[in-house]
Image (cartoon, helix red, strand yellow):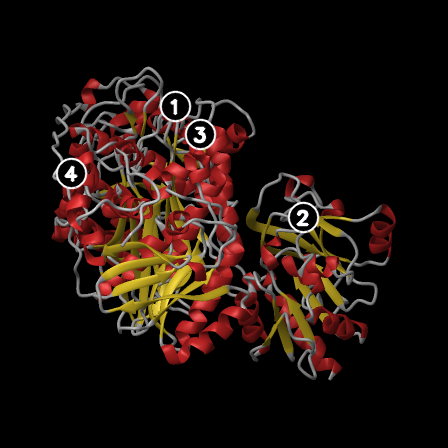
């Protein structure tokens, strides 16, 4: 019999983020009024963040299988086979709400959480990436948020000791009240030594490991499942505090006891802490779980059962150990100075039972806690298709050279050096391609195998056309991996949207998922892990409905290189080489940065992605890199072709003489249009004829753009654009802005 | 060369260091836990690697400097045998009093990871015999607190005795504030103790020993140590 120390009122139910219908479902399920601790547990398990109740029916449509997929969505992270008995374990997860409320700790614990997801599976993390979206640089809070988030990511990853090798940073006014922090971690394990959450065996000890439990982060997951009001800052106590030092110890201790064969099942305590991890271990293993909270190591005195079950204190793990190995495991944890406590056991009852101070405070059906979470088929309206903007109808206000210099200095296109220099990106001694290229390349152990990784999405495309935007995010990740010569293998998706209870927001989510599914299927690029973050909107005082972020389905892609020495970088390599463009150009200006930042218009349909052409073009480029024919390769994306060529020149200091644009496309549309599926690459002059023939045979458009040489980009009728000056344009804005300069 | 890499809780470049020592010296170093009280017999070189010992929540290196193994390191140094501290290792050596001075927060108050250029000031030490005096090498830094400072008399003594082995410099070897990313006094990147057998430095030569990683400029330091010990043997 569960005693109820507190009456469950409708107000209390609402405060726990549960609707009256959801509460009725609880009553039906357990046949009595829940205790306050039980109500907290339902709130933790059934909130959007943990239950995916709005997105689940749509997520099921994503392709998740390929011969190389070892573990798809549903575990702590996805696992793919990269050959030679090795597996790559990776996932991306958001920490958006906490990072807005407390940018340093919010971002830091975001990194900590995703690292834990990866090493929980037995993998040593080898790289981190992140995708960050901030508000308008002119907004008074933006600088503070950028500084805090970047310092927090660095503070955690640098201390933990994992290189942070890539990612994205963007600015847009639609993120003013809700910045996004999506953190991705990539780890390595042996394919036959992957660890899972499912417990097995009755009467097995459940062991608590890591840091002590405090009152931090209580209701973090519920907080992340609601929109912000004017009181966002008051939610600071729901943000956890990170301790990368403890996490590093936890990593080493976990890997050590895994190597010693002590572990049956393991689950990290992330969102909803002890509750979620214990329930998952039991439910996945078809077992009940009994916990004795008096055994839980606490940092603070007089913690209630409710607080302990909902605490999101960081750097904690739950494990089921082999009973005969318990002492050995404990000795390893003590050596690393970490807490180790047997807090419960597995049972045959399929009940989740929690005792505190000799009193049973929770008795719930374990399977139903997860499985019977509500699933919503929320109504949605499709985003109306915007009109296609004809290039001829866009007036070019400034000459090309000036346009290029302006674009390179814009917040969204300028160099991110100020950001990634605060991340240790060389630790590990395996970072072959550092930040600043199309994809990061990290050598696997002693090589020659290497992994390529990237994080991509173009939210303005998703806003204009969720379906095409979803496709584009996947295609862009695939293209970035291809541009370094890697075979793209799989993705993790981190879907950031507004309030799903609004049909137009739900329409964005549904559209983007459809686009992602279509592209992942066409490119054989399955989704193996992911995370959904909804309610990214803020209701400002006096407003009827919230303002949502741009739909931002970030795609983290991983690919493999058989030999890192046979790969490509974007820097021009030598003078006198031919520059070619792979892929078709029609001069697509709708939703381009040119249109937005030069013409002041954010409209039109985004560039469509032809997935068949995408695959054809990419496969040719990858082959040219593999055969060591292509000397430099760069994906053509934000800002268009001239921006891509400028980036190749800036990376090397070598310029290029460019040919005039074709007569059937306006020059500004040719150079700044954002047509998809394109790569700029260089070849030695004597290799051109054979490549032209190959492209022709494969039906791939190929265009000669010019020749490398000199120290400037030159275009007929335009002044010279010195590579050194372009670099100055690109490198200046962000450091100056962060030092208090103009937005 | 019989090398030892110390492992304090929170150290995180111990694997990079061990791999480099093995690559250059041909033998795996012993990894010695901070709670030990003795170094393996016959240890030639003790390396304190980079990282965040004890999270660096107190002053960087302050807790590690008081770990049980540090007594053995002190005795090892007193016998004239070699000690190398890199990054957090340098901070620990300063906190342990094996080197003078202290590492403050970078002048820009931010963690910085980038390749820097170092001018090698002397080539007649066990640590720098693999280089020429005046040679410029490119190696990465990754630290938030690398801004070396000591009182005026100590700096004068360090300079007078030629104990500054590495300085931050421009690619052509000029000392220039624009190329001194952390604001260290006299652009000091690495110093020797008075006896010349203990080196502390902020940059990470161990991360630049393979062409695949973009530079092999760090190799000279380790190759020089191997050479020195072989000649001494």
Which residue is under mark 1?
A230
Residue A440 seen by the camera:
no
Chain at numbered mark 4: A
Indicate the position of residue A247 as horizontal and vertical percent values: 48, 58
Q: Is residue A464 left or right of residue A218?
A: left
**Can you say whether B200 is above or below A590 in the image?**
below
Q: Residue at x 21, y 37 (%)?
A: A469
Q: Residue furthest top?
A: A542
- Spatial distance from mark 1 to mark 2, Cα to Cα? 50 Å
Indicate the position of residue A523 as horizontal and vertical percent values: 17, 52
Which residue is under mark 4?
A510
Q: Secondary structure at mark 3?
A: helix
- Spatial distance from mark 1 to mark 3, Cα to Cα? 8 Å
Q: Secondary structure at mark 4?
A: helix
Q: How many marks?
A: 4
Q: Are marks 1 and 3 on the same chain?
A: yes
Residue A528 seen by the camera:
yes
- Spatial distance from mark 1 to mark 4, Cα to Cα? 29 Å
- Spatial distance from mark 3 to mark 4, Cα to Cα? 31 Å
Chain at numbered mark 2: B
Question: Pointers 1 and 3 in contact (CB under 8 A)?
Answer: no
Which residue is under mark 2?
B169
């Amino acid at each position: 019999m569960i005693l109820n120390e507190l009456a469950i009122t409708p107000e209390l139910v609402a405060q726990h983020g549960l609707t009256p219908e959801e509460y009725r479902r609880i009553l039906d399920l357990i046949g009595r009024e829940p205790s306050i601790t039980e109500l907290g547990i339902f709130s933790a398990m059934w909130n959007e963040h943990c239950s995916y109740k709005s997105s689940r029916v749509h997520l099921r449509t994503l392709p998740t299988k390929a011969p190389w997929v070892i573990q798809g969505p549903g575990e702590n992270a996805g696992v793919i086979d990269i050959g030679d008995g090795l597996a790559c374990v990776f996932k991306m997860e958001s920490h958006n709400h906490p990072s807005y409320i407390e940018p340093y700790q919010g971002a830091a614990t975001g990194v900590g959480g995703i690292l834990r997801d990866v090493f929980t599976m037995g993998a040593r993390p080898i790289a981190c990436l992140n995708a960050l979206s901030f508000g308008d640089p002119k907004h008074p809070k933006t600088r503070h948020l950028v500084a805090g988030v970047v310092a927090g990511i660095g503070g955690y990853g640098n201390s933990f000791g994992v290189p942070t090798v890539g990612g994205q940073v963007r600015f847009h006014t639609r993120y003013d009240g809700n910045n996004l922090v999506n953190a991705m971690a990539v780890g390595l394990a042996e394919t036959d030594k992957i660890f899972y959450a499912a417990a097995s065996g009755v009467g097995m000890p459940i062991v608590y490991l890591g840091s002590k439990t405090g009152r931090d982060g209580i209701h973090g997951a519920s907080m992340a499942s609601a929109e912000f009001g004017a009181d966002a800052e008051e939610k600071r106590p729901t943000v956890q505090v990170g301790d990368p030092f403890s996490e590093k110890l936890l990593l080493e201790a976990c890997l050590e006891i895994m190597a010693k064969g002590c572990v049956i099942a393991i689950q990290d305590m992330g969102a909803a802490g002890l509750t979620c991890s214990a329930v998952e271990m039991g439910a996945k293993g078809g077992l009940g779980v009994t916990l004795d909270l008096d055994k839980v190591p606490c940092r603070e005195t007089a913690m209630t059962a409710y607080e302990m079950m909902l605490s999101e204190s960081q750097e904690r793990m739950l494990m089921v150990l082999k009973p005969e190995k318990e002492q050995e495991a404990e000795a390893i944890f003590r050596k690393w100075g970490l807490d180790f406590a047997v807090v419960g056991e597995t049972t045959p009852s399929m009940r989740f039972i929690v005792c505190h101070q000799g009193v049973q405070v929770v008795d719930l059906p374990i399977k139903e806690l997860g499985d019977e979470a509500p699933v919503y088929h929320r109504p949605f309206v499709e985003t109306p298709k915007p009109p296609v903007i004809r290039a001829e109808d866009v007036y070019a206000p400034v000459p090309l050279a000036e346009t290029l210099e302006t674009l390179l200095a814009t917040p969204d296109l300028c160099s991110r050096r100020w950001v990634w220099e605060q991340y240790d990106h060389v630790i590990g001694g395996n970072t072959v391609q550092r930040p600043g290229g199309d994809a990061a390349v990290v050598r696997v152990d002693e090589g020659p195998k290497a992994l390529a990784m990237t994080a991509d999405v173009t939210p303005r495309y998703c806003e204009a056309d969720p379906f095409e935007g979803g496709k584009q995010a996947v295609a862009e990740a695939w293209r970035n991996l291809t541009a370094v010569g890697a075979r793209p293998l799989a993705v993790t998706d981190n879907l950031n949207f507004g309030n799903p209870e609004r049909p137009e927001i739900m329409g964005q989510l549904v559209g983007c998922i459809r686009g992602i599914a279509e592209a992942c299927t066409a490119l054989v690029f399955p989704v193996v892990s992911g995370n959904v973050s909804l309610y990214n909107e803020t209701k400002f005082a006096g407003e009827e409905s919230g303002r949502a972020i741009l739909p931002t389905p970030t795609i983290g892609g991983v690919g493999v290189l058989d030999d890192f020495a046979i790969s490509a970088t974007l820097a021009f390599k030598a003078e006198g080489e031919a520059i070619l463009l792979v892929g078709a150009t029609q001069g697509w200006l709708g939703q381009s940065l040119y249109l937005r930042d030069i013409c002041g218009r954010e409209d039109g349909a985004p560039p469509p992605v032809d997935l068949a052409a995408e695959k054809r073009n990419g496969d040719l480029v990858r082959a040219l890199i593999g055969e060591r024919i292509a000397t430099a390769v760069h994906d053509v994306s934000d800002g268009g072709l001239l921006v891509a060529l400028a980036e190749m020149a800036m990376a090397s200091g070598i310029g290029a003489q460019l040919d005039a644009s074709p007569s059937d496309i306006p020059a500004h549309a040719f150079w700044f249009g954002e047509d998809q599926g394109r790569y700029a690459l260089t070849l030695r002059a004597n290799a051109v004829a054979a490549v032209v023939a190959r492209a022709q045979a494969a039906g791939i458009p190929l265009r000669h753009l010019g020749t490398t040489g000199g120290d400037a980009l030159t275009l007929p009728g335009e002044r010279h654009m010195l590579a050194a000056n372009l670099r100055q344009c690109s490198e200046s804005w962000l450091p100056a802005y962060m030092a208090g300069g103009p937005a | 060369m019989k090398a030892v890499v110390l492992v304090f809780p929170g150290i995180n470049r111990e694997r990079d260091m061990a791999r480099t020592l093995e690559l250059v010296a041909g033998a795996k170093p012993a990894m010695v836990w901070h709670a030990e009280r003795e170094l393996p017999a016959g240890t030639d070189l003790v390396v304190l690697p980079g990282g965040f010992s004890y999270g660096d929540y107190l002053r960087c290196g302050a807790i590690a400097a008081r770990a049980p193994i540090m007594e053995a390191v002190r005795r090892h140094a007193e016998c004239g045998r070699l000690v190398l501290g890199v990054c957090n290792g340098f901070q620990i050596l300063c906190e342990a009093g094996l080197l003078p001075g202290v590492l403050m927060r970078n002048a820009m108050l931010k963690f910085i990871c980038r390749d820097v250029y170092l001018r090698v000031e002397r080539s007649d030490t066990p640590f720098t015999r693999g280089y020429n005096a005046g040679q410029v090498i490119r190696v990465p830094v990754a630290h938030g607190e690398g801004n070396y400072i000591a009182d005026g008399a100590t700096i004068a003594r360090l300079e007078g005795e030629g104990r500054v082995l590495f300085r931050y410099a421009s690619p052509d070897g000029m000392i220039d504030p624009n190329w001194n990313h952390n604001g260290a006094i006299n652009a000091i990147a690495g110093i020797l103790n008075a006896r010349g057998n203990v080196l502390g430095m902020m940059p990470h030569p161990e991360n630049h020993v393979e062409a695949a990683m973009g530079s092999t400029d760090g190799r000279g330091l380790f190759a020089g140590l191997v050479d020195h010990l072989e000649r001494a043997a």
